[in-house]
Amino acid sequence: MKTKKLKEKVEVITLGCSKNLVDSENIVTQLKGNDIDAYHENDDENPDVVIVNTCGFIDLAKEESVNTILANVERKKAGEIEKLYVTGCLSQRYKDDLEQEIPEVDAYFGTMELPAILARFEADYQHELIGERRISTLPHYAYLKISEGCNRTCSFCAIPLMRGKHISRSIEDLVREARELAKRGVKELMLIAQELTYYGLDLYKRRELPALLRALSEVEGIEWIRLHYAYPTKFPLEIFDVMAELPKVCNYLDIPLQHANDAVLDRMRRQITQAEMRELITIARERVPEIAIRTTMLVGFPGETEEEFQDMCDFIEDMRFERVGVFQYSHEEDTSAYELEDDVPADVKTDRANRMMDIQREISLELNEERVGQQMEVLIDRKEGEYFIGRTEYDSPEVDNEVLINAAENYVRIGDFAQVEILSADDYDIYAKVVS
């Protein structure tokens, strides 16, 4: 006899990174697959149950997660919702504390407890739904999580505490999911993981990201494949060869370097030197001359001196990365860096972050201005005000540059590719007209 399903309307709220977003999409997919009315963040709906998928990576993310939980506790007290569940990284890491501090939440779940969440709705986990994930991004792109967890031991990072050891998904499963996404109109796949380059070591006893890229490139309908979150140490150089070989693999690599001073890199346990990073970037640009490299830098790590920070600034100026993000160090308990004194004042961290972004802003402006007069292919994401907004293969959604096309003078369809000519540029956006 089939179990009778509950009829609650369920809203899933996501905080944090794209990997969390995929987890939320899987929650919605599984609930809907069990005939439960579930959706991802829609203010126009009136849910009976809210599931908050939290982030616990750094202090600001933890604060946002707690505030979101408390806001939904108030909704529950006001009778606007009946039940409140919390999952994700913050819940995984601080479950006992949260249960004591915010007992109004009906249940807390860790990052790998989707079946337990479903049990609250008298629902069963259905493996066959994996390839039918309901995406909450724009319909023409989707994130594809190729693995879970991380085996690295960076001293500042709490991800292994929240996500566990690295576990790869099989190439067959990922290709199956990519095909289903393509059938629903997805044209761009963004491969994500805590650590992309480790992919396959657990399943196949060797790094198999190149093999995965070749398999995904065979999926009809997928036009762009983008690589996010690659670790620089012992980087598998054949990835550059595959990028140069396969037209569908974007000339784009997100490779967080975190710092450039050898002493700080050693304290961070990054297992790489500045000289080795310079060599890696040089090889990347030799093998893929059109590559755009996004990196992330961390300022204010314990003991970071002005000289060590300046060494990183000099590195940024020398390497001229196409895209750079900057984070301020957050002192995370249970990490090995927590044993160090968090001795860089908050105002100094902020000042250093601003100074580094000022350097990158000038670099970005110069690189964008070099594009003026060129023709480029753009994927159109949306219309906003007087402009159609698109991206080149060198730009990922939300974090990178955008292409603005005057809607009064040009017509394009959202979700389509268009050939454009670059007319002008500023530090983070370029302006273009359609040529075909």
Image (spheres, rainbow, N blue to C red):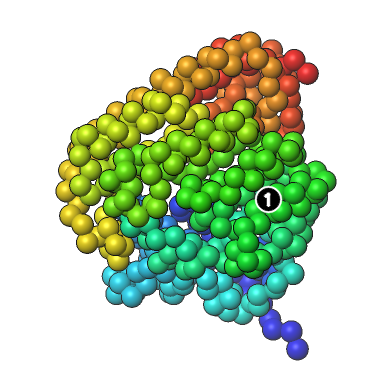
- Residue 350 lies left or right of residue 274; in this view the side is left
Q: Locate residue 76, reporting x and y percent.
A: 42, 65
Quarter-of-image position of residue 74:
bottom left
Q: In the rendered view, would you say 136 is above or below 422?
A: below
- Residue 24 lies left or right of residue 272; in this view the side is right
Q: Nearer the viewer, residue 115 or 75?
A: 115
Q: In the rendered view, would you say 281 is above or below 107?
A: above
Q: Locate residue 227, reporting x and y percent.
A: 60, 44
Label 1: few (<14), some or many (≥20) within 10 Å? some
Is residue 321 visible to the viewer in this orientation of the structure?
A: yes
Task: Work out which residue is located at the far right of the displayed protein and give it.
Answer: 220
Q: Locate residue 228, reporting x and y percent.
A: 56, 46
Task: Work out which residue is located at the far bottom of the displayed protein and give it.
Answer: 1
Q: Nearer the viewer, residue 378 or 124?
A: 378
Residue at position x 75%, y 89% in the image: 1
Residue at position x 20%, y 52% in the image: 342
Is residue 71 visible to the viewer in this orientation of the structure?
A: no
Residue at position x 77%, y 59% in the image: 176
Q: In the rendered view, would you say 107 is above or below 149?
A: below
Q: In the rendered view, would you say 249 is above or below 404?
A: below
The quadrant of the image that shows the C terminus is: top right
How many numbered circles does the render carry? 1
Residue at position x 44%, y 22% in the image: 363
- Residue behind mark 1: 210
Q: Amino acid at mark 1?
A: Pro
Q: Locate residue 96, reporting x and y percent.
A: 33, 75
Quarter-of-image position of residue 242:
top right
Asked which secondary structure carries label 1, the reply is helix
